[in-house]
Image (tube, rainbow, N blue to C red):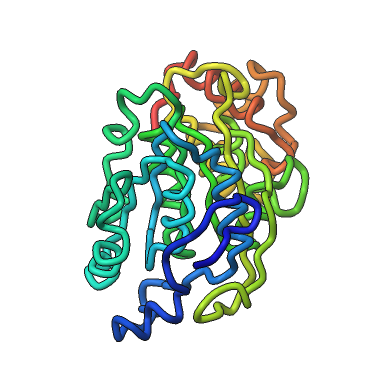
Amino acid sequence: MEMSKGTGVEMTIDSPGALLRRYGLQARHSWGQNFLIAAEVHAAIAIASGARAGRRVIEIGAGLGTLTDRLLATGAEVWAIERDRDLCAVLRAELGDRPNFVLHEADAVRFDYAAAIAGQAEPVAIVGNLPYQLTGPLLFALLEQAPHAGPWVVMVQKEVADRLCARPGEDDYGGVTAVLSRMRTIARVRNVPRGCFLPAPRVDSAVIRLDARPEPLGGPVADEVGLRHLVRTAFQQRRKVLINSLAALGSRAEAQAWCAAAGIDPGVRPEKLGPEQFAALQRARETSGAGAA
């Protein structure tokens, strides 16, 4: 048995290496499988998620169940999502007798998060070690279906964490950050060196926490999809000045009018604008009748 550092609870599951050997498995490189082996990082994720008795936690990519085990030990009801059939067999064998464990053999990008969070007395926490190639699709799936769930505590590539934690005007700031930070505060929990994984990836990672804002930054817009399209278009050629980027959505005269209505300098570069300014631009587009995606 192993004591979970920082949580004061005894863990029951073996290490990822031992589990892989026991079940004759190897990580699927094509699926981006890298199993977290650092107990202190598992503990940090569990603590940051607020997992406790009476609370549901959704785990994206449960893998071999090492993080799942830590979450279950807090008394939380854990809904584990895993698409790999072999890993699902491990999870059933190792954790299937735990009364607070629910396994969903499913694709996390297509999972029905809205149904999973419905009817819960407390906000549902969402955690996971996100496959690098699916980080964007997963975060936007959560934004669409679970905008008020939280917190989200996810492991991402360190470079992605740097971008998501960046502020307007910084080199790492981009369109994804502008969209996500409109709805969520984003903070780094801790960096995670590549040696904390089996097998070790070629890049370092970081755990970030995203908490729902009471209200979107910049206030409401009629069409959030249209706003995201606006941001994406503005950043497609981020070195262009704003009016030249916005011209892809209408005439130059229209772009000039939107900037004037939003009180924004049309000669500024998109990376200088925060979520509030993009929301103002979207409302200006909607007022002019051009705001839909």
- Residue 74, image x and y in percent? 48, 44
Q: Residue at x 45, y 28 (%)?
A: 123
Q: Residue at x 27, y 33 (%)?
A: 115
Is residue 251 depicted above or below 42 in this figure?
A: above
On-image quarter of the C terminus = top left
Looking at the image, can residue 89 be seen? yes
Describe residue 277's horizontal placement relative to residue 23 as left or right. right
Q: Residue at x 38, y 59 (%)?
A: 62
Is residue 232 depicted above or below 261 in this figure?
A: below
Residue sitting farthest toward the top: 287
Residue sitting farthest toward the right: 170
Describe residue 218's horizontal placement relative to residue 132 as left or right. right
Residue nearest the viewer, comparing 288 with 148: 148
Describe residue 231's horizontal placement relative to residue 94 as left or right. right
Q: Residue at x 47, y 71 (%)?
A: 35
Looking at the image, can residue 253 be seen? no
Describe residue 235's horizontal placement relative to residue 31 as left or right. right
- Residue 264, image x and y in percent? 71, 25
- Residue 278, image x and y in percent? 60, 29
Is residue 117 depicted above or below 196 in this figure?
A: above
Location of residue 50 (image quadrant): top right
- Residue 174, image x and y in percent? 63, 48
Count the numbered circles shown: 0
Location of residue 279 (image quadrant): top right
